[in-house]
Image (spheres, rainbow, N blue to C red):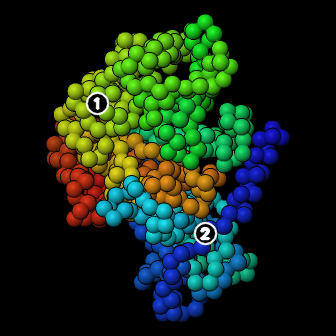
Amino acid sequence: MLLYSAVALAQVKVDETYQELPDPKPVKQASWSSLKPGVYVSFATANIRYDKHNAPAISPLQAQWKTKAWKGEKVHTQFLIWTTRNLKQLSFIWSKLKDGKGHEIPEQNINASFVRYVMADGLNNEGGGCGILPGHDSSLVEDVIDPVKMLPAGKNTTRPVWLSVSVPATAIEGLYRGNVKVIEGKNAPPLILHYAIQVLNHTLPAPEHWKFHLDLWQNPYSVARVYGVKPWSKQHFYVMRPYMKMLANAGQKAITTTLIHDPWNSQTYDIYGSMIKWTKNKNGSWGYDYSVFDKWVSFMMSLGINKLINCYSMIPWNLKFYYYDEALRKDTMIVAKPGSAEYEAHWRPMLMDFARHLKEKGWFNKTTIAMDERSMADMQKAIALIKSADKNFKISLAGNYHPEIEKDLFDYSVASNQLMDQATIRLRRESGLNTTYYTCCTEGYPNTFSFSAPAECVWLAWHAAYKGYDGYLRWAYNCWTKDPLRDTRFGAWSSGDAYLVYPGPRSSVRLERLIEGIQDFEKINILKERFIKNNQQDKLLQLKNILEGFDIGELKNKTAAETLQVAQDRLNSL
């Protein structure tokens, strides 16, 4: 416990000393000179990332906010504090929500947190997020939701605040009212904002029961590096717990594991190691140590992430396969192409032993041998080898749509620009197969970059509902950069491509908006099932019409925020 407490204290120290980077953009002095001196507070849309050093154009000030929510739903918005003078200490207090009839939503279900600024870049000249050159035009954007209790605000700066309410599943239908007070120091009178939540007579299940298949890839090696702990030590699992619990609470279904060292050819700041130790014995036989793999999977399952174990990769990007050679007494490797004799000799004994181990653990039916963005020819060779080792192995691919291998893939995530028809998706679901889609650096929009329009994160799950997909996949949850709290830029990819959560642990505007969309997806499915059961054809038609605006092509004509404003209002009216 002493060791764990030391880690926790170090974490608090980081919270207290965290400073944002300077803003490289010039200040629009006119935005401040037009204001009367003072401190301003107003509700604002969660669809805009407001500038730190420019006054927001909000007139008149919005002192009230009202929304609708299902029981069990988490809702949120943001409000802004901007000031023409230095504020040494800002904090908040909030009241419980009351309906005037004796029913309440308690204070612990409500939270107000500062939104901090990170460095971000943008898209390339062709409008995509790949091939970003060093020195690309950059700026500060709001994204980090920081649980720190107090922060200063400098003269002529804006401080966004994220207000969230988790409506209890046991809440009574009705209109609940409350307020949040912005406190400046000890003597200044509080600035008060009022808000109301109309709790509807529908119930959203807990995240572990959501049907949406969320697959955000985890990187435990990033956590070890940022916290300075030995990978797979007790301290490592201790500091990972709140991050992976946060992921479970987002409805995560899949565990990211590695079969080999560096499956993605060092494209992350923290290279993935192998969770399985491969040893070539002196007599030429092979041994496999699954102890790290077992610890990681057991740990994630203990947090409720237990639908799939995705194991990467039989086709790494550099085709290098590392192992320890007892005869040579050193780590070495081979380079082998799928279909070659060397490849078959390397993988067949491992797959057979891995199947045995998984069956002993009771995990075989949850496990996939997973690849990403590999050619159909290589996939066909790998599939044949996997099935020859054990015909019941499940296989996963994130990549282009290949009808020729579709039936071989238990878990298939297709790129957003790929056309898998809804009849195929439906047949796959009826056959017990999982079908999702993904975005990466290719798509300028919709996406989850740190500078992306926040509503796009919500829009992603609505697109899944429109297309009939089971969910959404994204690389990655926490492949952190060198300085992840301050600078989301990394490599040749648009900023924020590699992670959605920050050290602390700290959530993000992007992650919270993604969860918002997943909740909407669950609402759509719940209502659809109810309308089918009750033969409410008019309601089914209304639901179908609501989804019509969520084709990706529609984003050329209407923003995600504009589409969602209408769609969410209509959904909450059903």
Badge 1 crowding class, 10 Å Cα cut-off, few under 14, some 14 to 19, many 20 or more, is: some
Q: Of label 1 and label 2, which has the lower sequence position?
A: 2
Question: Tag on residue 376?
Answer: 1
Compared across the picture, whether 164 is left or right of 337 comes to right
Is the N terminus in the top left, top right, bottom left or bottom right quadrant? top right
Q: In the rendered structure, find residue 173 and report the number of the disc placed on it.
A: none
Q: Position of residue 407 (x, y in %)?
A: 26, 24
For the point 33% across and 17% down, the residue is 384
User: What amino acid is labelled 2 in the image?
Assistant: Leu
Question: In the visual, does 340 lie left or right of 311?
Answer: left
Q: Is residue 398 left or right of residue 308?
A: left
Observer able to see residue 309: no
Q: Nearer the viewer, mark 1 or mark 2?
A: 1
Q: Amino acid at mark 1?
A: Met
Whether the residues at callouts 1 and 2 have beta carbons within 8 Å, the answer is no
Q: Residue at x 57, y 12 (%)?
A: 286
Residue at image mark 2:
21
Above or below, comparing residue 466 to residue 54 in the picture: above
**At 30% from the left edge and 23% from the top edge, which residue is drawn?**
380
Task: For mark 1, give the secondary structure.
Answer: helix
Please give left or right for residue 470 compared with residue 27 in the image: left
The spot of residue 177 in percent (x, y) is 50, 65
Q: How many marks?
A: 2
Real-space Cα separation, disc 1 to disc 2, in angstroms: 44 Å
Pinpoint residue 221: horizontal percent, then vertical percent: 61, 40
